[in-house]
Amino acid sequence: MATLALLQGCGPIHPRWQNASSHDIVIAYLKGAARYDVKVKRGRDAVPLAPVDFQSVDTIEVKDNGHLYRFDHAEILKLHAECGHGFACWIRYDDSHILHVSTSQPATSKA
């Protein structure tokens, strides 16, 4: 428990995003007027650099091949419930445009 409290004090918690789609994507966290983007190349993973925990953002957007997919706060809270605190959580995005949560590193991750 002390370790978890110490880690929580280190800063915002973000899961790693894995791009399992056939295109490069951009993940964006939106909170109020602030926007935090990260480009994730096909077959790679990355973490958006944002000064807020991912479960507190208003919207998560995924830009994929010119299309924009939005996930609202209710969907984000479901992701957070599946991820727990996000220290060992991956969210995989694929060509189905659905977010898949894993609490262990996906086998196809290259990062």
Image (cartoon, rainbow, N blue to C red):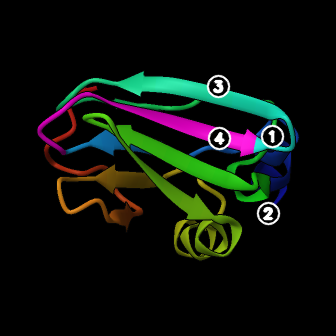
* 91 on left or right of 12: left
**What residue sits 55% from the left and 68% below the top?**
79
Q: Gap between marks 1 and 2, in whole Å?
A: 22 Å
Foreground disc of the pair 3, 4: 4
Q: Gap between marks 1 and 3, in whole Å?
A: 9 Å
Where is mark 2, residue-wise? 1
- Sequence-earlier tag: 4 or 1: 4
* 14 on left or right of 12: left
Circle on res. 73: none
Where is mark 4, residue-wise? 29
Mark 2, secondary structure of its residue: loop
- Sequence-earlier tag: 3 or 4: 4
Q: Gap between marks 3 and 4, in whole Å?
A: 9 Å
Q: Gap between marks 4 and 1, in whole Å?
A: 9 Å
The part of the chain drawn in magenta is 21-30
State yes or no: residue 52 in magenta: no
**What residue sits 62% from the left and 65% below the top?**
76
Mark 1, secondary structure of its residue: loop
Could you say where residue 64 lies in the image, as x and y percent from the top left? Answer: 31, 39
Foreground disc of the pair 1, 2: 1
Where is mark 1, residue-wise? 52
- Sequence-earlier tag: 2 or 4: 2
**Vertical placement of residue 94 versus 44, above or below:** below
Q: From this viewpoint, is residue 23 visible?
A: yes
Where is mark 3, residue-wise? 49
Whether the residues at callouts 4 and 1 have beta carbons within 8 Å, the answer is: yes
* 34 on left or right of 46: right
Q: What amino acid is at disc 2?
A: Met
Foreground disc of the pair 4, 1: 4
* Mark 1 crowdedness (10 Å alpha carbons): few <14, some 14-19, many ≥20: some
